[in-house]
Image (spheres, rainbow, N blue to C red):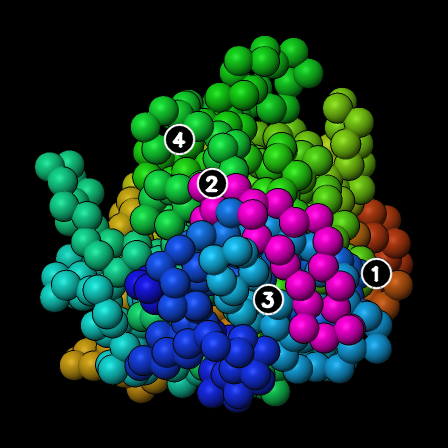
Amino acid sequence: MCEGSRIKNRPSRVRPARALAGRALKSIGASLLILLAGVVCFADPQANSPSIIKVEPPSWWANHTVNPVRLLIRGKNLGGARVTATRPQTVVSDVRITSGGTYLFVSLRVSQSAQPGEYPLIVETAQGRATVPFRLNRALDSRRNFQGITTDDVIYLIMTDRFSDGDVSNNSPAGAPPDAGDRRNPRAYHGGDFRGVINHLSYLKDLGVTAIWLTPWYDNWNGVNNCDKPWCPSTYYHGYHAIDYYGVEDHFGDLQTLRELIEKAHTLGLKVIQDQVANHIGSHHPWAGNPPLENWFHGTMQNHLLDKFQNSVLLSPHGNHEEVRNTLDGWFSDDMPDMNQDEPEVARYEIQNSLWWVGMTGIDGVRQDTIQYVPRFFIRDLSNALHRQYPRMWMVGEVFERDAAQTAFFIGEHRGWDGIDTKLDSDFDFSLWNVSLAVFTDHAPMRTLRDQLKYDALYPDPSRLTTMVNNHDTRRFMSLEGASLEGAMLHTAFMLTVRGTPQLYSGEEIAMEGKDDPDNRRDFPGGFPGDKHNAFLANQRTPSQERMWQWTHDWIKLRREHSAIRQGRLVDLFYDEDAYAYARRNSNETVIIVINRSANEKKITIPAGAIELRDGAPLVPLSGSARNATVMSGQITLIVPGRTAVAYRAS
Ligand SMILES: [Ca+2]
Ligand SMILES: [Ca+2]
Ligand SMILES: [Ca+2]
């Protein structure tokens, strides 16, 4: 009777089942309550009586901009059910029952005066009745949560499974076979978790970053894929195959530990960004075999399009319908059912889900995975919903394109040819990243940086871009052809001083190597039991690790100390085969940055009028190898050592 009726990953602030049970028993009368090791079930003993498996969202808030909230209830024998609220502060409407009585949608209007607490619903049929647990939460303090991300921030990407194992007790959760946690397999779970991140927050603070982006923490399947392809055996350690949009990955911890992480991060002045995935779920999600609606996905597990990734058809006003639909509706892979946001119930579900995580955890930003493959109107509606409830909230989209026109098409505050303004706060700047890699591995002249930056004309505000050093989907710098430690250092210095909000990838600060996925996701040295070498500690870093770490630290510090680098206008001053000089200027100051890629010392001359400096004005060196300089005869002459970057403050 209660088979499968586990309410998964109950939020930590939901009142324990026992307390709820007391009230429910009174209302249920003759119904039977069974409490067995976390299995909660309220159901009538009759075989065909309704039962509840999952409630999404499991909780909400009074005085929320989304009201009524739409609940999706998964259960059994829900056909013909009548739904009633148990307390007058909530009112139900618009019941819709689907899929042979296994799903029930219901809208719940919440009175403004409703206090936090339990607000269960009753589902009743001729065969019996069941209680739907539901809670109203107390809102988190908006002064220290939901802060948003600005150019004052430096983001640090952590792949939770590969950063640090702070709790070995969660390494083999229920349903995980032994080989799912084989650290020798780069596609297995390695044990990293929230506790490991908590343990190293001070490391991140010392490095100087101000925000952490964690790869998805939705619950994923614990099993192992075995196949005859090169990517098997494999697991979903990366988190991009959700089986529960409201659950926390049990390898990483629980919702309470996640909240502890975010609270401790906030106390240290570190923000937290959640990786959300609206485009698709994992094929082990219960929906895959039994979707709530026939059109819940684009197609079915058996019959669907595969995305050919002809992404430019989205940008072009001339894209044909078939190619556009393939790109939007095609599955990212055969085991990633593609969510159909054209169906209003799906769009509403996903927008509420996004808001729920923000409200429950206090996160400061959202990174939206594979954002190109959801409809642009959905990006707009999601962005608007986030901003309506949390005015400072920030969302960055993954538009993995090397063409700035495509990046610009998806960023918000301007309309595309389709009349849609996505309102998207930020995109990752893959095009500038791509050029910077080519330049600093000596495959393109330095002036190419300036040539790429001229396409900033395409953006309503290029400072809103997220300028990425690297990420978990790309080769690490040190494993690129032509890579050198100095090249990695210059690439990092450039990304930390150019316009936009910089984003680092864990391990780049110690010049880790890593080829294509999954080699680029090696464990952070020192984060795991038995590691012989701990790169979190300065005295255990190799000389090259320490050199890269200190360099990264120093340029982050320089950025923190100079508002012009964070917020100023970028002005091109000099560019040739080997060097690029640019100023960052605001009303406070002008900072000049010169990057000399060549092996030799280089003398460059900048017209002082370009930054309105008079003869005799001194330039104050801001970085170690910068030499004194002054303005003479309307010229600034700078001598820059080989293979380095220097900065000056012009006063
Ligand atoms: Ca662990
Ligand atoms: Ca899991
Ligand atoms: Ca899609």
N-term mark: 1 or 3: 3
Determine if the magenta segment contains residue 97: yes
The kind of residue on which mark 1 rests is: Asn
Identify the residue at horizontal 67%, vertical 73% (top origin): 86
Give the number of the disc on residue 300: 4
Q: Residue at x 37, y 78 (%)?
A: 34
Q: Residue at x 49, y 33 (%)?
A: 294
Marks 1 and 3, how far apart at CA: 60 Å
Q: Quadrant of the C terminus?
A: bottom right
Q: Earlier in the sequence, mark 2 or mark 1?
A: 2
* Badge nearest the viewer, 3 or 2: 3
Of the numbered discs 4 and 2, the one sitting upstream in the chain is 2
Residue 482 appears in the picture as rendered: no
The N terminus lies in which quarter of the figure?
bottom left
Residue under label 2: 99
Along the polypeptide, which appears first: circle 3 or circle 2?
2
